[in-house]
Structures are given as C-alpha cells and as structure tokens.
Image: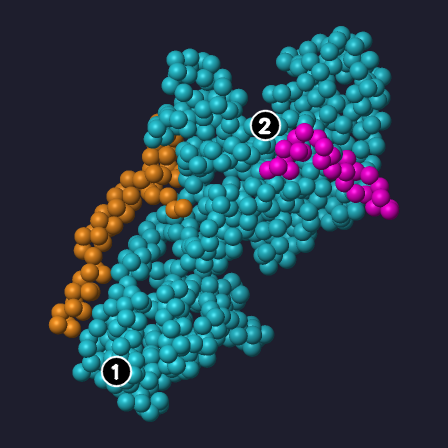
Amino acid sequence: MPEKLIVRDWRHVRVWLEPRLQGVRLVSLDVFDTVLGRYVGDPLEVQRAVCRAVSQRIGMDAETVWRARQQAEQALRAEAVQAGFDHECRYSELLTRWLECLPSTVLREQERGALPRFIRQTELALEAATLYVKPDAQVFMDWVREQNLEIIAMSDMYLDGDMLCELLRRLGIVDYFTFVYVSADFKLGKYSGRLFEKMLQVKGLDSQQVVHIGDNPISDRRMACRTGVQGVWLYEKADLRRRERQVLSARMAQRGGIWAGRHFFECVQTRSQQQDGLNPRDFFFRYGRDVLGPAFSVFMQGLQERLQQQADAGKPLEKLLFVARDGFLFERLYRTTDATVPAEYVYLSRRVITAASTADGLSHAQAIVAFYNPKQQGLASVCKVYGLPEAALQPLAQQHGFEDFSAPIHDWEDVRLHHFLQDEAVQAIIRAEGKQHRDLLQRYLEQVGFFAHQRVALVDIGWNGTVQKFLKQAFGMRKDFPQLQGYYFAFVPKLYADFGDDNTCEGIVHDSRRGNACERIPAEFEEIFEQGARSHEATTIAYREQDGRIVPVLKSAQAPDRQAELACNPLVAQMQLGIAHHWGHFRAVQQLTGYSSQQLLPYVHGVLERAVVYPTTEETCELTKLVHTEDFGHDHVLALANQAVGWGDLLRPRRLWQRLELSAWRYALFERMPLGIANFVFRIAYLHTVKK
Amino acid sequence: MVLSPVKLFVYALAFRFSSGRGRCFSPGIKAMTIWYATRLRLFLLDRAAVKWWRGWFESA
C-alpha cells in the first residue's frame, strides 16, 4: 500500500513529488476546497439561493421549492444505492425530478420549457460567484504542466461533468485538466474508492502511476491508498480554521441584529481579499471600499427593493432622476445592475431650483434659508443663494438701513429685513429675475422628460430634500406635474416639513422621522458622504440655450471653491473606485445570501459609527486633506477638521464645546487623545444634547 | 474591515448611557457571549489539529 501522506501546503506537495516524477504519469486533483476555495462556509447556501431565485420566478414559497429539491435528491440517491451504485445523484436527473416534485398547478405552461435552463444557469452562476481558484494550487498546476504530466480533476459532486467543466472554464482553469471525473456521472464516489477504480480502468493506467491530492483524509487519502493510488492529504490548517469561522458566522447570522450584516460583510471581505488582496491600494480606495462602500451599497440595495415594491403594488416608477452632483455615484452604481426603470442624471442644484422659486417673489421664510450657513454674509448671501442681482438690490437695501450689504444678519426677525422684503420695488426685481430662471429650468425639466411621466423618483444623497421641495413649489400647479418620490441616502428635514400632496420623501440609511438615534450617524459627518458620492464636475449655477437645447452652466473653474475641488478630485476618484469595487462584491454575495437591506442596516450603522466617531489616526490625517464645498450659492470652502484638541483645551470646556459644535467632523479633533476614550465620552455628552 | 462584536458592543454603550436606546447595533450580551465562547471552544478543541493527529496515527 502507498505511503499515507499528510502535507501542509502546495509547496510541500511539490517538494515531495519532485524526486518521484519518473514513476508518475498522472496527477489527480480534488476540486472543491483543494483547487477551489469558497467565499462562504456552507455549500448549501448556493442551493438555498437557487431555490430563492426559482421561487421568485415561479411565484412559489422558497421553502416549498427547497423541500421539493431535497425530496428529489434523496429519492435519486436511494435509487442509485438500490441499483448497486454509490449514494450519488446527477444534476440533470435531479432537475427533471425536482420539477416533477413541484406542484404542477403553480408551474405555468410557458415556464416548463424555460425553467430548467434558468435553474441550470442560476446554479452555475451562483457556484461560480462563490468560488475562487487558490493561487498556490494554480502555481502547482503550472509546475505539473511544465513537467509534461497529465492532470485530471476528481470530485464527489452532484453537478454533471459538463457542468463542472463549465464552472472550471468560468474560473479560467479548465485547460489544466485533460478529463474531469465526477461522482455524479458514474454514480461512484471517491469515498468508496470506486471512482478511483473507474478512473484507472478508463485511463488504462497502473495505480502506482497516479498521485491524487485532496483535502479530505478519508476520500482523498485513505480510499485512494486502498486502491493503490498514492493519496496525499492536503492539510491546510489556516483554510480549515477559516471555514470553521465562516460556519460559526453563518450560524450566528440566524440570530438577526448585527449578526446577519456581520456575516454578509465577512463574505464580501473574503471575496474581495481573494480577488484583490495582492494589489496595493491607497488610503482613499480602502476607505471607499471598507467604509463608504458598505453604506452606499446598502443604500443602492434599499433603492432596488423599493422600486420592486412600487412595481409589486401596481404603481411602478417610470423614471429615476439622479440629482447632480451627489447622485452621480448612485447613477453609476445603478447602471451596473439589471434594473429596468429608465434612469437619467439631471443637472439640478439647490442654486438653480431656489433661483427659480423666486418667480413669485421672495418670502421671509425663503430669505432666511441663506442664513443657515455659519459663514453667511447677510443680504449678499441671499443674493447668492437665489441668484439675484446684487447691483440692482444694493441701493434699495441701503434705503432700508443696510449700510453694509455683506454684513451677517444674526437676528432673522430683523425689522430692516422685513421692510426690505415688503418693498414692491425689491420684489419686482426679484420676480423678473426669478421668472427667467424658472422658464429655463422648466424647459430643462421638459427636455429630460420630467413632466412626461406619471411617477418619477429623485435619487440623491439627502439631506433636506431642498430640490424636491422647490420643484413642487415652483411647478406643482402644472397639471402634468408627476407624483414625486424622493429616495435619499439620509433624510433630515430640518428646513421644511410639508412637501405637499403626491410628493413623498424617504431616507433609506437614515430618516430622522424614524426617531432612531443609532441611525443618525450620516448626519454627524455629512460632508464625507457627499464627497464620496459627488461628481467631478462643478455645480450647476444656471442654464442657457444652445442650439435649441437647454444646457447647464457650471461654476467657473476659476472660483476659489472649484479650485479646491479640482485639487481633491483624484482623491475622490480613488474613493469611488473603492466603492464600485465593494459594490461588485456586495451584489455577488447578496445574490447568494439573499439578505435584505433591512437586515444589513444595523451592522452598517455600526461600521459608520466606528468610522465617524472613532476614526483611526490615518483616517483623520488623510480625510482632512479633503475640502468641502456646497452648491447653495456661496464660494466658501469648508475644512473637514480644525486643530486637534489638546489636554490644555479641557481646562476651558465652554470654548471647547463651541469649537466642537462649529467643526464639520468634531470627533476627528480628539486624535491626540489615546484609546478613543475622549471620543466615547464626547459621544455620550453629544447624544445627551441631541436628545434634549 | 469586519468589526469585532465587542467593539460594536462598546460603541452601542454610548447610546445606552445617553438615550437608553443602544440596541440598534449592539450585538447583545447573550449573543456576544455565545460567539466568544464558541470561538474559545474552537480554539481549544481545534478540530483541525484533531484531524491531523488522526491522520498521523493512521499513517504511522
């Protein structure tokens, strides 16, 4: 009997095999967990996912489909044993029997023809999505091929040989093998030794001329040795432990809460590392992949679920409008899906919308919107936000007591402001300007088909839903104004409460109306999410007519805030590459696990809490290189963090508190404090103030 | 970057100490205990090592 070998890795297999090459004619390799690894611990997850896909297609309960499959499989295996074969079944036979086991009343006639093909393709696609080629195994196979030795694959598997070949082809390694022996084809398994005997018989080889390598001590070593084939047990300890952890993670996921999300993102991480682990990635790519990627991906999944719900309710959305500039990334991610709702990236900004909203004059409530910016410059800010002519309004402002047009107005009930806005000459100038803006905006909206549909959705990062609010305000009187649904990454309606009839908003990752303190984390550092999602183009400041079409006028590249943006664009591009990379893996794992966005959200909130409240030193240093600009008419640039808090600052708590309140990313200021304790204490204090 | 359950638990404590609503991304004490106990058991029992010894005795 051959040696009973235990080898710890592929390099040692080669070391053992090299001096014995002369007597060997054929190297046989086990496929699953030997040459191919899995991103998920349990192969049954693929079968479950296939059942879910089938249940969706035929409109039947997934559990019924699963039971039918189990029933068919068990029957076929029992029949094989009765016929004197091993406990094996073949996928092509299983498929036929499985469909027979499903209640025939549910299967529509037209489905009968297409369904087997759909199931087969889904099974192959999902298997391919969960598997990866182990790099060391591929190096070994290259070496074996250089020695002019034949390689065959031997697997105890329910897939037919041609399906396994297709799987190996999709993974790019089918050409290594001259033949694939699958237990399902012969109804003989490695575990009984009969598949080895069959292989020797077919190849006409002496057992001593064959070496078989696999991860199972019984099937791949003991039984191979019993038939005279040199069996080698590949004992990869790290791999075994990883699989144990994956199984534990999958078991914990059944508890719900964060565990489902943790299991999900562990699979995403394993998949990403296997495919991209050797590529050196810069900080912004990694931040996009590990922090913003989960958040934006779960938002995109939530969006797709809502589109499906609308369709199921018989009110399908007819058009998706991704709003510039922060809808840019979402539109890119949406394009990678097979969603069917037509989508368009539209050049809208708060600036052009607010400008158009002044066609009927400027109210006090509208004017004070300009004062929310901490760097506001009074009436000058009002003009910038609403695109009003400063030169024409300045003399009139002076008549109402505004000596300095750019002086901040801290008292929003300032009598001068009220008188200024009540002045008919002021309102006439504003209305004339607003009408021009509104006409151009209206023509642009007609051009993108906004009024041509009954149900339209706006997709944007958030926060107040200003664009949606003002669209309704400016054009809501039109009879063809559509039912408008806003889907936002985070929705925090601080400025407006009433959006009018047939005009609804929802925050998918955070919606302040849900009153859940744990999910409000995106609102604690809005700027980083805007940076991660924004377009590289400048903000839209107006429209103009060109060759009979309305085109957006973007902010000048010479503007100081635009200059700062241009400098940051390469960093943002890296972040977006990381997000897109994550999204690719996210979709593959989601298809396999079937988790909904609601199941993933608790863990994603935890990820964001870590990133925003407890940043690493590297994150603080790198992210503060970004500058933030906004499209509300100002030219200001907002630094993402100010000078870090030192121990001496703790002696002046009131000043420190004011500094923290004004900072865009207040938690980054504690970078000099060790262990994150200061962040934790400040978090508690801050949550107390929010509650009040 | 997958977060450890204990980190999530600590982050959620800040909510518990302030608003009293820390359940959102807290793994829960019971589930967390089960998680770490199972990890410890896997480490101590080390089924992979048991498999190896079985193979070693068989080949000896």
Q: Which residue is mark 1?
A: A229
In the rendering, what colour is chain A? cyan
Badge 1 amino acid:
Val
Residue A324's image quarter?
Answer: top right
The label on residue A502 is none
Identity of the residue drawn at 55% across and 38% down? A529
From the viewer's side, name the closer residue of A554 and A423: A554
Residue B59 visible? The answer is yes
- Chain letter for the orange part: B
- On whether residue A560 falls in the magenta region, the answer is yes
* Chain ID at mark 1: A
Residue A137's image quarter?
Answer: bottom left
Identity of the residue drawn at 70% across and 30% down? A559
Q: Which residue is mark 2?
A: A638
* Chain ID at mark 2: A
Residue A476 visible? The answer is no
The region drawn magenta spans: A542-568
